Amino acid sequence: MRKLLLMLLTVIPLFTSCNKDDDDSFRNKQYTFTEVNNSGISGVVMIREVGAVNAESAITIFLEGSNESDSYFTNVYTNSVSEEGEIIIPLEQFDSEGYSNTYVNGLYQNEEWDPENPISYDKLITFDGHILIRLNGTDGPVVATANIGSNAN
């Protein structure tokens, strides 16, 4: 099932890519997770535009190699993986299939969503940030990482 989801995640953008005559709805950008400490965890993160009016976005993650008996936690942090940073967007927990989807309404400041500080799709794909996947809690060991936005290669 996971391999099918990863394949679809890779193929769908080929069929939904926009040309200059299309409107900007449903744009997306993908990043790949790097396994850490031989964890066996890899995957793909897709940042998607889900609303043309307010340019809202969603962050969808598919994990490969996850174990159903483990809990995985993930957040978007400021800066690159090598620089570390603060949590700026908490992401939804993964289901038993290694899938997580979070609609991003704004940045997370002082442990609360800040709707006065929205982050659009365009801002998110140029954001100076990274995503960490941790095992068994927000302070657990990091099992996979991905630079996003301006930090991605």
Image (cartoon, rainbow, N blue to C red):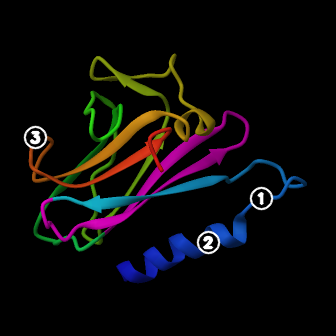
- Spatial CA distance of label 3 from label 2 is 34 Å
Q: Identify the main secondary structure in magenta.
A: strand
Real-space Cα separation, disc 2 to disc 1, in angstroms: 12 Å
- Residue identified by numbered label 1: 18
Q: Label 3 sits on what residue type?
A: Asp
Residue at horizontal 27%, vertical 32%? 83
Q: Is residue 142 magenta?
A: no
Image coordinates of residue 153 in percent, x first then y, are: 48, 50
Question: Which stretch is magenta?
Answer: 37-63
Q: Which residue is mark 2?
A: 12
Q: Which residue is mark 3?
A: 139
Within the image, what quadrant is residue 144 found in?
Answer: bottom left
Which quarter of the image is occupied by the N terminus? bottom left
Q: Is residue 99 above or below residue 10?
A: above
Q: Tag 1 or tag 3, which sits nearer the N-term?
A: 1
At x 53% / y 76%, what residue is drawn?
8
Q: Quadrant of residue 101?
A: bottom left
